[in-house]
Amino acid sequence: MNILYFLIGCSVLLALLFLAAFFWAHRNGQNDDLYTTSMRMLLDEETEPPAKK
């Protein structure tokens, strides 16, 4: 029964860690530009012209 208390404590600690990481990422602007990354795969990539010999 003691292992259940330990596992509950570990899961709560892990959840708080992920919550802190989410808020840290949000404060540093990780979710500011959601449009560009979703459209980047639809745009053609520019290719460099072949080198002249």
Image (cartoon, rainbow, N blue to C red):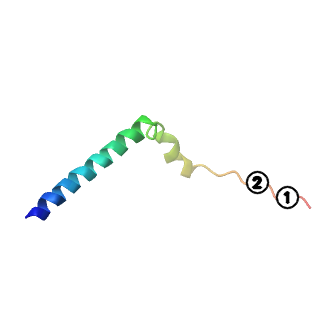
At horizontal 80% and vertical 55% (from top left) the residue drawn is: 49
Q: Position of residue 28 (x, y in %)?
A: 45, 37
Q: Which residue is mark 2?
A: 48
Q: Position of residue 42 (x, y in %)?
A: 55, 50
Q: Which residue is mark 1?
A: 51
Q: Is residue 2 above or below residue 24?
A: below
Q: Nearer the viewer, residue 20 or 5?
A: 5
Q: Is residue 9 above or below residue 36?
A: below
Q: Nearer the viewer, residue 21 or 30?
A: 21
At horizontal 85% and vertical 58% (from top left) the residue drawn is: 51
Q: Nearer the viewer, residue 13 or 30?
A: 13
Provide the secondary structure element on which disc 2 rests.
Answer: loop
At horizontal 48% and vertical 38% (from top left) the residue drawn is: 33
How busy is the neighbourhood of tag 1: few (under 14 within 10 Å), some, or many (20 plus)?
few
Kindly give the residue lying farthest to the left in the view shown.
1
- Name the image quarter holding the C terminus: bottom right
Circles 1, 2 touching at the beta carbon (< 8 Å): no
- Name the image quarter holding the N terminus: bottom left
Q: Position of residue 36 (x, y in %)?
A: 52, 42
Please name the amino acid that badge 2 sits on. Glu
- Whether residue 31 sits left or right of residue 39 in the image: it is left
Please name the amino acid that badge 1 sits on. Ala
